[in-house]
Amino acid sequence: MCPLLHPIEKTTDLPERMNNPFDYVPHPLCLEAARRVCDHLAQQADWAEEVASGKMFGVLVCQDAQGQVGFLAAYSGQLHGRADWPWFVPAVFDYLQPDGYFKQEEACISDINRRIDSLECASDYVSAKADLVRLSSEAEAEIEAYKAMMHQAKARRDELRKDAQADETDQMSHLSSQLRRESQFQKAELHRLKARWNGAISEVKSRLLPMESEISALKQERKHRSDALQRWLFDQFEMLTGRGERRTLTKIFRNTPQGVPPSGSGECCAPKLLQYAFLHHLQPLAIAEFWQGRSPRMEIRHHGQFYPACRGKCKPILEWMLGQKAVADSHDAPPSHLRIIHQDEHVLVIEKPSGLQSVPGRTAAPSVESLLRQQFPEIHMVHRLDMDTSGLMVVALTDEAYHHLQRQFLARTIYKKYITLLDGEVSGSGTIRLPLRPDPLDRPRQVVDPEHGKTAVTDYRVLEHRGDQTLVELTPHTGRTHQLRVHCAHADGLGCPIVGDRLYGKAAQRLCLHAAELSFTHPATAQRLTFSSPVDF
């Protein structure tokens, strides 16, 4: 047996083909393999603190040429400063070798950083920078004060000219000449004042120029070396297919929207596991990745929870390694029916089933919009629900109704209430405020980002407990993508993902999130309408 293929007892039927790494329920053999990984980690005292801080691990159940079944184990990135710990599969390319090109070039870049820091902290440079700031501030203040004085002087001259306008004597002629000379003198003095300050500032800039030129040259060299090193690194990662074909990360990502591999590509669990399996002619049967340790500050990761592979870094790689069909988004056939619960000449209120898109996507699959257009050619979609969310939606049948409803959404006067079933126990009521933004490397996943995220506010109220699950009422005050799903799942929110949430929790028969109540002002009658829909989970 392959040295890193750990034996595992076949307590269940083997899968007919490998699962999709981006959409799966962990196979029982993967669950057993993950338990074995956790047992191994528990024996490594030196790793305890790092693992407790949070780390992604992965397992791949495989079969060798003799029909023996076992599992491979991997961790994402590095663990305790190494990418090649025994018992785990090695890195696709170990660039951390002390005498290797990467470490040597990294040392050169670090030396450039030290030289830049030394120059920027040198007393002559710091003093000259401070002098430049001080002189620039003093110059601006004195010049602005002189301009203010000139403005007041001009106003005084204008008043004198106005008072003496009717006087055509020599005295008036003398006054006009005197006022003109005063204006000319002040303009000349302002020019001389600016010239004096410009001279003083130029002297300081001349002191700074050679130092800043040296710093700029070093920064340019650092950028050139860093870019070249990154390109070199991605060219060393040659990813295998099951047929033995090889392709570098540079070529794999060439036709993606970003054009280049994101940092860390090829170092996640799934590519490492498959690379080792293909190198040793093992047949992959089932893959799973799980989180160990504390939840990160921004992402949703719970200890012991299984997660799909990341899309930004891993999907192009796994499409090459496994084939596009093996990692394509797979969903059950979507529902093709809608229930209309209100209809007049201005609006429709419909009940969307789970699994149906609100608007057409990249495929020809039906959507709320396409189904309604078969009966109402002039519909206008005012808002959306996630494909896996069920419940109430309002649709406009005229331009006027569409714009009226849009203004209500913008003014947040349309009331929406959701009912959800959480995978865990929650109590009480309150308000969740967690700002959200998209994860550019793992769309459509959202992350919590206090610095760059958009405000997202949700009220919650517990309705009932169902064993270790909780039925909760959610009232969003904003409409961010995946707001309710993230606010429920994140450790700083309710800390319990919605049942059936494949992105932020565990896969199940459906996402238990239902838009149960909708209230808005009718665009034509100004009557306040409220609709409700029963929950079926």
Image (cartoon, rainbow, N blue to C red):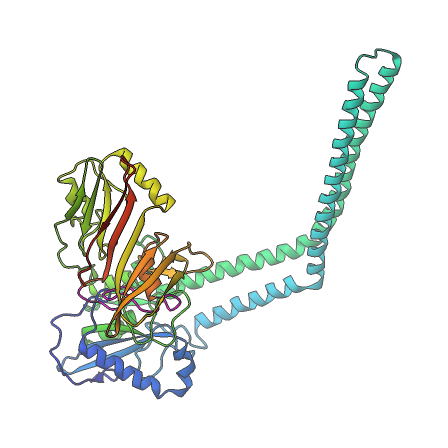
Task: Classify the position of the N terminus by image quarter.
Answer: bottom left
The answer to whether residue 311 is magenta is no
> Residue 189: horizontal and vertical position, in percent?
80, 34
Residue 315 or residue 359, whichever sits in front:
359
The quadrant holding residue 80 is: bottom left
> Residue 386: horizontal and vertical position, in percent?
25, 54
The answer to whether residue 497 is magenta is yes
Q: Looking at the image, which residue sits at the far front?
A: 527
Q: Which residue lies at the image location 69% right of the left edge and 52% below the top edge?
A: 133
> Residue 491: horizontal and vertical position, in percent?
37, 69
Q: Which residue lies at the image location 32% right of the left edge and 52% below the top edge?
A: 257
In magenta, the rendered stretch is: 490-509
User: With respect to residue 43, does 462 lie above or below?
Assistant: above
User: With respect to residue 488, does 178 lie above or below?
Assistant: above
The secondary structure making up most of the magenta span is: loop
User: With respect to residue 330, does 106 lie above or below?
Assistant: below
Task: Classify the position of the C terminus by image quarter.
Answer: bottom left
Residue 186 or residue 61, whichever sits in front:
186
The quadrant holding residue 256 is: bottom left
Q: Which residue lies at the image location 27% right of the left edge and 61% below the top edge?
A: 315
